[in-house]
Amino acid sequence: MNIDANVQKILFSVLRRWKLLVIFALIGVLMGYFYTSHFTTLTYTSNVKFLAYAVDGNDDMGEINQTSSQDPNKSSEYVRTSNTSKMNYAMKMLPTYVEIMNTNEFMTKVTNALNKKQNSNYGVSTIKNSMEIELIEDTAIFTIKVTTTNAELSYNIAQQLETSIPQMMRQTNSSLVHAAVQDKAVKAASAGSLGYPKKCAIGALIGIVVAAAYVVLRTLFDVRIKSSDELSDKYNIPVLGSIPNFSSGSTPRQVPQPQANVETQKKGEDK
């Protein structure tokens, strides 16, 4: 049997057992719901958004003022070009600062400052694992999401980052790039979604895959010949005829005798 015939056979077998696929998909949905409701922990997220901007150390104010007195149009064009260059520089340097934020040294400073302020004893890994840094494409804006199992802790970490990140950026790279808080952290009023639809969909997909794999394996390992076409394809010989399937367990039907013969027989016995 060629490859195309095998593929068609497998697809036909899978489609023919669509009820099995549906059953396994429903089982996967129930398992996804059960797992989400019993083994997923509620989390709380606080976000803080920053704007990075470059600062010119020399500022070139003298050059700008001199150009302004000579030609006001050239002065405004120079300022616009300077601001654009600073913004491009800040955008270019942002990935570097993000890597610095992920270092153990910076995380240790944030953790120590938070523990001192809150009189707590959190570990560096707790703070580091709670953070997720997201760069906004084609901008100098970045957002930090702090997610923990405690709304107060998420809010406190985000508040500490509002102070620690601008301070770190001022002390790095000769203070050429600074950060300003654009959106301050807000304490989460409720827990984040547990993601029931997503996890139930994943469970249904897993169920369908398992059911399809079962059907495929059963089809591949089934060596029985079920039709004359399969016999011809396998042995490359023509089929001359087939024997019908007679039922061996059936009992022959008894034909009742005519009523007249029965009455004649009774009369003979009486004589």
Image (spheres, rainbow, N blue to C red):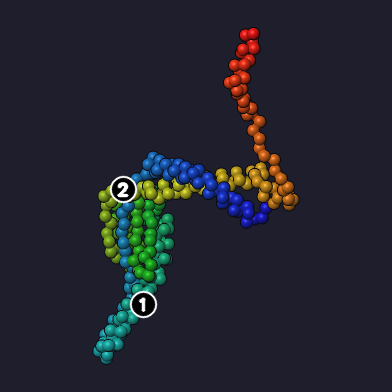
Circle 1: element type? helix
Q: Is residue 144 visible?
A: yes
Q: Position of residue 50 (x, y in %)?
A: 31, 64
Circle 2: is it few (<14), some (14-19), or many (20+) Cα within 10 Å?
some
Q: In this orientation, which residue lies closer to the viewer: 69 or 28?
A: 28
Q: In this orientation, which residue lies closer to the viewer: 163 or 6?
A: 6
Residue 191's disc is 2
Q: Is residue 124 visible?
A: no
Amino acid type assigned to the residue bearing label 1 in the image: Ser
Q: Position of residue 255 (x, y in %)?
A: 62, 25
Q: Residue at x 38, y 56 (%)?
A: 132
Q: Position of residue 170 (x, y in %)?
A: 34, 66
Q: Nearer the viewer, mark 1 or mark 2?
A: 2
Amino acid type assigned to the residue bearing label 2 in the image: Ala
Q: Which residue is mark 1?
A: 85
Quadrant of the drawing holding the C terminus: top right
User: How many marks on residues?
Assistant: 2
Left or right, 169 with respect to 189, comes to: right
Q: Residue at x 35, y 58 (%)?
A: 144
Up the image or down, 23 lies above or below 159; here it is: above
Q: In this orientation, which residue lies closer to the viewer: 207 or 222?
A: 222
Q: In this orientation, which residue lies closer to the viewer: 18 or 39?
A: 18
Up the image or down, 270 lies above or below 246; here it is: above
Circle 2: element type? loop
Q: Residue at x 35, y 75 (%)?
A: 86
